Image (tube, rainbow, N blue to C red):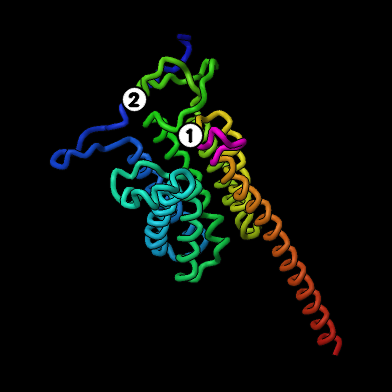
Amino acid sequence: MNLSYIIWNVDPDIFIIPGIDWPLKWYGVMWLVGFVVSQQLMFHFFKKDGKKAEDVESLTLYIFIATIIGARFGHFLFYEPSTFLTDPLQIILPPYAGLASHGAAIGILTGLYLFCRNKNYNYFWMLDRLVIVVAFTGGCIRVGNLLNSEIVGTPTDVPWGFVFVRNGEDFARHPAQLYEGIFCFILFTVLFLIWKNRKAVMYNGLIFGIFLITLFGQRFFVEFFKENQEAFEDQLALNMGQVLSIPFVLIGIFVLYWSYKVKSRTSTFRLEEVKSNSKAKKVTNAK
């Protein structure tokens, strides 16, 4: 074994909760960290943009429920569809092993739509803020995957390869979870800076479009360094993660184009309105 490899032997359980014999896992803690920090960031966005900060609490509830439902059902829909017929209770009962990020994305988009409709918010305005914190939470979740020694990469001989001892292996793999986690934190930083420096002039949908293209573009690429999640994927030219990422990238491109065209039309209309008002004032002054 190459001594330069990273020997990874982290216990996924922090401790057993007394009385209920239930383990507190690092993965769950990272989910919680992501949601708590994300909620505080949304409070910040709402206050800076002059929105009602109290709406963040109900938004958090909408997104939390939508994320869990979407991620859970997405896993079985995309990776184990037969479970809906053979053992449907497995989908809704603990221990909730199996969550799909693409399903979570669909859940978030749906939950946010319901929230915006109920609270009368612009959907794309809200998406531009929400995806910033989604990128942060996504990074936390991938760190949780690493702590769980799951969603591992393909075998490698690069010096930063991880040996996942708890999986009974003595060879190195790409730390695909770490690749995605680092990218998510970088994406979070970039999107936050775009919001901070351009929020006064940017058009609705800009950050959302960039998020879809970059996040799922990197997901498509990183999948080449990851082991397939299910056996049926071995027969596919592209695995399920890549197949599901393509539509999100295309949607991101469409959103950027559509939002820019809407912004352009709005800007042109306002310019013509200003010119018209200016001419009217000149006529009035001439009289």
Identify the residue at horizontal 65%, vertical 56% (top origin).
255
- Pick the residue in front: 262 or 203: 262
**Is residue 137 at least partly visible in the picture?**
no
Rate crowding at label 2 as few (under 14), some (14 to 19) or many (20 or more) other CA atoms within 10 Å. Answer: some
Q: Secondary structure at mark 1?
A: helix
Residue 101: image location, x then y, percent: 48, 45
Q: What are the residue bounds of the magenta stretch?
A: 231-240
* Secondary structure predominantly adopted by residues drawn in magenta: helix
- Pick the residue in front: 268 or 236: 236
Residue 231 got which mark? 1
What is the quadrant of the N terminus in the image? top left
Residue 44 placement, left or right of 238: left
**Is residue 107 at least partly visible in the picture?**
yes
Residue 240 placement, left or right of 162: right
Residue 139 is a magenta residue: no
Identify the residue at horizontal 21%, vertical 39% (top origin).
22
Q: Amino acid at mark 2?
A: Val
